[in-house]
């Protein structure tokens, strides 16, 4: 690929400077698949150039993960060593920024007992709750990005050779990350400003509820939490460090009212959940709770997800993404939530972001629940956007405003 090395360096610089906005004498923690080690090292170099005090790279190995799930007992998989907890807690307590490279094989754990997977995920979420709470409260800067791996690329482009699939996925990522522009950092500033402006429009309306409808059968009334905040792109840590949690990002999101959701919603893209694909599914809601669900593929995994805890049958996020956006227009199904959620309006099962409620970052779990925000060990986005999706906003005085028409913003 022409200028590949140059694009890689642009990518690394963008993630370090705009993604986590690393500060001088700060710590950086990088989660990376072993296949992406070359880029993890590039990120480390960029961070050190800027003046980072130290960088820690935490590698994972998917092939070994598969071996472990095939051979280890559920009890062993559910045992999270204290040293693993201490590692994350140390870095989060010392103000580290966190970069995670999301590039998993969408079918990694296909055929593995769903109860074994859910037990592992729940135990890990419980063990690392202190760390994850710090990030969802924006106490530390964090950023999730993606890189091609052979297993992922061949799932996305299954009609070409392995090498060509990887090249095509690189090209797609470089495009949607705006890295082909002369100045990616400037392009991202302009993009973030546009998203922020739309968030301000939604905030000024202060909608009581949103009504979603499309030809698939989605007919959902979703109330928004009192004192909700519409958020987009850039966020700030408690020390006023600006960062971008997801790159790419096209979404504007906020918190639903936990018990204020009624109707039915249909998925429009597969969900890659813990290495298992869940496809063509639907949820029926009554007073905020999922009371029924269907799935043509991955039913057992979806059932385990919904049974994680008390909050996993409720929603924690509603996000608006225009159908006419760069990732959607690429006409690529990525089988990766980071990308697919930014090609489509989506909802999230489970945990709500405390920062989407006024004063939420200072609230306890009990206080968040009283504020109509959801609390859970999980947060799983699923896509509901389509080219014919209409969204009607209803204000507290009963005024109706067309928010989306035929998949795109109506204002």
Image (cartoon, grey):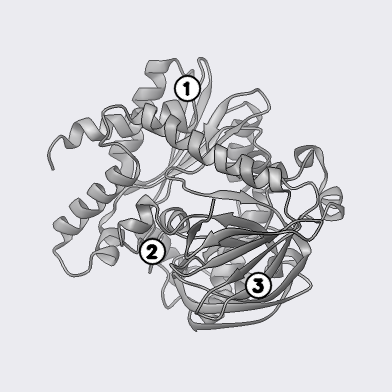
Which label was assigned to residue 192?
A: none
Q: Nearer the viewer, residue 106 or 65?
A: 106
Between disc 3 and disc 1, the foreground one is 3
Residue 220, labelled with which disc? Answer: 3
Q: Circle 1 sits on which residue?
A: 54
Identity of the residue drawn at 32% across and 40% down: 37
Which residue, given by chain and number where applicable, does mark 2 sit on?
Answer: 335
- Looking at marks 2 and 1 on the same chain, the residue that comes earlier in the sequence is marked by 1
Who comes first in sequence, dot 2 or dot 3? 3
Label 3 Cα crowd, 10 Å radius (few <14 / some 14-19 / many 20+) = many
Residue 78 shows in this picture? no
Give me the C-alpha separation between circle 2 and circle 3. Answer: 25 Å
> For the residues carrying marks 2 and 1, which lies nearer the camera in this image?
2
CB-based contact (under 8 Å), mark 3 and mark 1 = no
> Could you classify mark 1 by the number of other residues whose Cα lies within 10 Å: few (under 14), some (14-19), or many (20 or more)?
some
Q: Quadrant of the N terminus?
A: top left
**Picture coordinates of residue 118 (x, y %)?**
59, 69
Disc 3/disc 1 C-alpha distance (Å): 48 Å
Residue 18, percent from left and from top: 45, 29
The quadrant where residue 75 appears: bottom right
Residue 402 lies, in percent from the top left, at: 60, 60
Q: CA distance from mark 2 to mark 1?
A: 33 Å
Vertically, is 251 above or below 289? above
């Amino acid at each position: 690929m022409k200028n590949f090395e140059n694009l890689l360096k642009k990518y690394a610089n963008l993630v370090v400077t705009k993604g986590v906005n690393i500060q001088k004498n700060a710590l950086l923690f990088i989660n990376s698949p072993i296949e992406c080690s070359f880029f993890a090292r590039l990120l480390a170099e960029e961070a050190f150039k800027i003046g980072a005090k130290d960088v820690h790279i935490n590698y994972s190995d998917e092939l070994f993960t598969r071996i472990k799930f095939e051979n280890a007992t559920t009890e062993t998989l559910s045992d999270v060593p204290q040293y693993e907890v201490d590692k994350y807690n140390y870095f989060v307590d010392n103000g580290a920024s966190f970069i995670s490279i999301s590039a998993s094989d969408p079918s990694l754990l296909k055929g593995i007992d769903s109860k074994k997977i859910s037990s592992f995920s729940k135990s890990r979420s419980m063990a690392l709750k202190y760390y994850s709470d710090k990030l969802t409260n924006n106490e530390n800067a964090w950023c999730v990005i993606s890189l091609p791996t052979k297993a992922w690329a061949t799932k996305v482009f299954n009609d070409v050779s392995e090498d060509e699939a990887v090249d095509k996925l690189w090209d797609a990522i470089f495009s949607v990350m705006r890295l082909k522009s002369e100045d990616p950092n400037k392009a991202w500033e302009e993009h973030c400003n546009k998203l922020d402006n739309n968030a301000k429009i939604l905030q000024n309306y202060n909608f009581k509820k949103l009504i979603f409808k499309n030809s698939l059968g989605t007919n959902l009334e979703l109330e928004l939490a009192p004192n909700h905040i519409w958020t987009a792109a850039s966020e700030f840590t408690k020390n006023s460090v600006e960062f971008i949690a997801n790159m790419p990002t096209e979404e504007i999101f906020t918190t639903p009212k936990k018990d204020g959701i009624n109707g039915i919603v249909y998925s429009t893209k597969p969900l890659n959940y813990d290495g298992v694909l869940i496809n063509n599914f639907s949820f029926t809601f009554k007073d905020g709770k999922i009371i029924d669900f269907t799935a043509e593929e991955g039913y057992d995994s979806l059932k385990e997800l919904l049974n994680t805890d008390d909050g996993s049958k409720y929603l924690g996020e509603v996000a608006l993404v225009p159908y006419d956006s760069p990732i959607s227009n690429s006409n690529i199904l990525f089988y990766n939530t980071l990308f697919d959620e930014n090609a489509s309006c989506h909802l999230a099962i489970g945990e709500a972001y405390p920062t989407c409620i006024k004063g939420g970052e200072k609230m306890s779990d009990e206080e968040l629940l009283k504020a109509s925000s959801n609390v859970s060990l999980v947060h799983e986005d699923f896509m509901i956007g389509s080219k014919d999706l209409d969204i009607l906003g209803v204000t507290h005085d009963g005024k109706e405003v067309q928010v989306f028409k035929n998949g795109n913003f109506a204002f």
